[in-house]
Amino acid sequence: RWRIRDMIDFPVDEAVVDVVSIPGTEGTTGRPAQLFAVAARNQVVAAAAKPFNDADIPLEVIDIPEFAQRNLARCLEPEGRGVALLSVNERGGLLTFTSGGELYQHRRIDITLAGLRGAAPAQGEGMELQLESESPYERLVLELQRSLDYFERQFPRVTLAKLMVTPVAGADELRAFLVNRLDIPVELLYLSEVMDFPEIVELHEPARQTQCLDAIGAALRQEAA
């Protein structure tokens, strides 16, 4: 609490605080292990729990989107390599970096689904995807490039296998655009390829998967023994 008191805009005594470890990297040039601190106002957490308490449903965990996304990324990681996962919804974009089922880094990106709609890239000469420099697609690429470069500098011993992107409107065009500008394989995330939804047919629809991404990821949480 003493360390985070200047990082939050409310009294630290009114905060619920939890921490999660970030693995270090081995070797003399490696990075030491660190901690992520998560803080929220007591009344915000109480308000989130109230509907469940009123319905006599016991809560074991209140989670955050960053860890829900980490849980999903765990299903996508090749052996010994990490994954960058970008999700975009109406609230904005979230980029996470995971390896070995651990969350190493995360970043919020000010790009929303509404901003991407109607901004699909057009095909120019030579079949290269063309956009104005201030378009949401160009701003997204810039943020991704910066984040990927920063991660590589901070965790040089963690190799990223690919960037996964949740399907959005114009998903194929977005993937082609990112492939053309990033030095990392880019794939679209279709959850039905890594998990089954036998009783919920609508979750086979990419748009519905994107809407339910946080809930699905939270349901994949695994507690250490």
Image (cartoon, grey):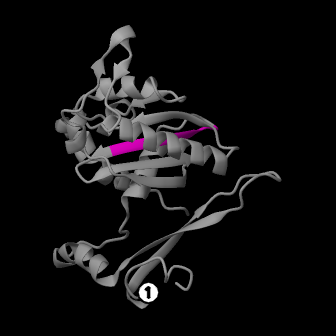
The residue under the point 69% across, 44% down is 156
Q: Nearer the viewer, residue 4 or 135?
A: 135
Q: Nearer the viewer, residue 55 or 6?
A: 6
Confirm whether the magenta stretch covers residue 95.
no
The relative height of residue 164 versus residue 17 in the rendered view (above or below) is: above
The residue under the point 79% across, 51% down is 29
Residue extending furthest front?
Answer: 133
> Could you tell me residue 181's position as x and y percent?
46, 27
The relative height of residue 190 versus residue 40 in the rendered view (above or below) is: above
Q: Tell me the amino acid under the disc marked 1.
A: Val
The residue under the point 29% across, 29% down is 171
Which of the 4 quarters of the picture holds residue 52? bottom left
The reply to whether residue 199 is visible in this rendering is no
Residue extending furthest top?
Answer: 126
| Residue 101 horizontal side relative to residue 172, left or right | right
The relative height of residue 120 versus residue 26 in the rendered view (above or below) is: above
> Could you tell me residue 31's position as x and y percent?
71, 56
The relative height of residue 46 versus residue 113 in the rendered view (above or below) is: below
Residue segment shown in magenta: 80-87
Q: Nearer the viewer, residue 158 or 116?
A: 116
Q: Which residue is mark 1?
A: 12
Residue extending furthest right?
Answer: 28
Which of the 4 quarters of the picture holds residue 189? top left
The local crowd at label 1, few if under 14, some if 14 to 19, many if 20 or more residues have their Cα within 10 Å, is: many
Magenta stretch, overall SS: strand
